[in-house]
Image (tube, rainbow, N blue to C red):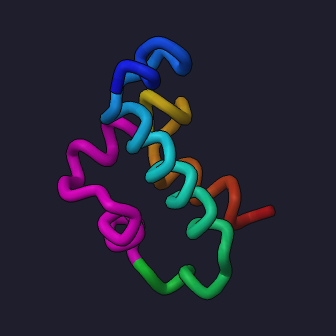
Amino acid sequence: SGILNGMLKMNFFDFINHYRIEEFKQKCKDPKNNNITLIALAFDCGFNSKATFNRVFKKNVGCTPSEYFAKVSVS
């Protein structure tokens, strides 16, 4: 925890959530996940709450999960 705070300037939860968000973003780009809901993907990545997932995602990525999915699923 001290190393994360000192070296990366983020706390443990921010560190874990960063990797959860990155995993979610990868799953969104995989066509085999197109029939799975966004919240199911979020739960699969380790989030336990829809509200927490939406808040953390928007804070880290700058858009909502559905906006992100719409961008990456079109391209």
Whether 43 is among the magenta residues is yes
Nearest to the observer: residue 48 or residue 35: 48
Between 40 and 68, the one nearer to me in the picture: 40
Residue 36 image position (x, y, % from top left): 43, 81
Residue depicted at x 69% and y 59%: 72
Measured from the top left, where is residue 71 in percent x and y?
A: 68, 53
Q: Is residue 18 magenta?
A: no
Question: In x, y percent, where is residue 60?
Answer: 49, 31
- 51, above or below 50, in the image: above
**Residue beneath the point at 30% across and 66% down:** 43
Which is more toward the observer, 18 or 51?
18
Q: Name the residue at 32% across, 61% down.
A: 46
Q: Which residues are magenta?
A: 37-56
Main SS of the magenta part reads helix
19 or 39: nearer the viewer: 19
Q: Is residue 13 above or below residue 24?
A: above
Residue 55 sits in quarter: top left
Q: Is 54 on the left-hand or right-hand side of 58? A: left
Q: Which residue in the rendered view is the most extreme toward the right?
A: 75
